Image (cartoon, rainbow, N blue to C red):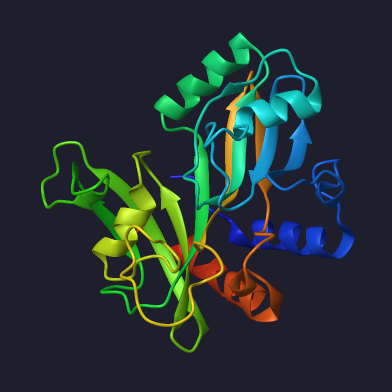
Amino acid sequence: MPCLCLHYIFMRTLSLRISGLFSNNNPFNNTNEMYTLIHHHSDFILVSKHPDVSFHKDDGEMGLTERIRRDLGLEKLYPVHRLDRMTSGLLLFATHRDAARELARRFKDRTVHKIYLAISDKSPKKKQGLIAGDMARSRRGSWMLTRTMNNPARTRFVSTALAPGLRLYGLRLETGKTHQIRVAMKSIGAPILGDDRYHPREAGARPDRGYLHAFFLEFNLFEKQYRFSHAPEHGRLFQGSAFFEALEALRPKIESKTDSR
């Protein structure tokens, strides 16, 4: 199991907030309404997708892949994984077929390491550990976690208090299935705040976004290791000192207790 060194991630994120520098690019000078450009490599493009942006063409609007390809003047761009519309964060594209094949193999072999951040306003059944089970289709395009373990979705997580009634979660995917984190969070009684599909609708003001963010990505491509992190740019609860203090509080938990049940 790889070391999930959140101290490294946190210090890179804090440095980003202070200096605006990241992976030899300034993301705040490469931002539009759909994404922030994080890294432009000859083999791949890495962006941070903004929340409520569709990966595919939606209602006549240009999809994210086509927008990035057009903005960067690329002939081809190959998506190698996806994020749900509500989810923000790191998203990887290959710039040619060889890179696309190699990255697809890495994702299939589960050697790409991803950490997500989420916020819930519900009390979880447990505060850290492994969430595992088969996923089955439910109603109206939703999924549910079952008790069977034939081909289980596996998500490891830790959490810490963020504010009264709110918890911040750090989650590492060991598999990659549709709505996996959203379903996992619901299964422990802590659906993601702002998730219209899995969080029960309640009276009052609607959250300003769905609070799920792809924060960290590590992968090997053509015998070279790459590691990136990028803090959320949108959402009131993903900003400010309380969030960064909670993020730092997760560090020792991720480093020492990712095997907890």
Q: Quadrant of residue 41?
A: top right
Q: Residue at x 43, y 86 (%)?
A: 165
Residue at the front extreme? Answer: 60
**Relative to 129, does residue 160 appear above or below in the rendering?**
below
- Residue nearest the viewer, comparing 83 with 99: 83
- Residue nearest the viewer, comparing 48 with 50: 50
- Residue nearest the viewer, comparing 66 with 214: 66
Q: Position of residue 13 (x, y in %)?
A: 72, 59
Residue at the top extreme? Answer: 98
Can residue 261 be seen at all in this image of the molecule? no
Can residue 225 be seen at all in this image of the molecule? yes
Residue at the left extreme? Answer: 148
**Relative to 44, does residue 119 appear above or below in the rendering?**
below
Q: Position of residue 19 (x, y in %)?
A: 89, 60
- Please identify the quadrant where the N terminus is shown: top left
210 on left or right of 108: right
Q: Residue at x 77, y 46 (%)?
A: 32
Q: Quadrant of residue 99?
A: top right
- Please identify the quadrant where the C terminus is shown: bottom left
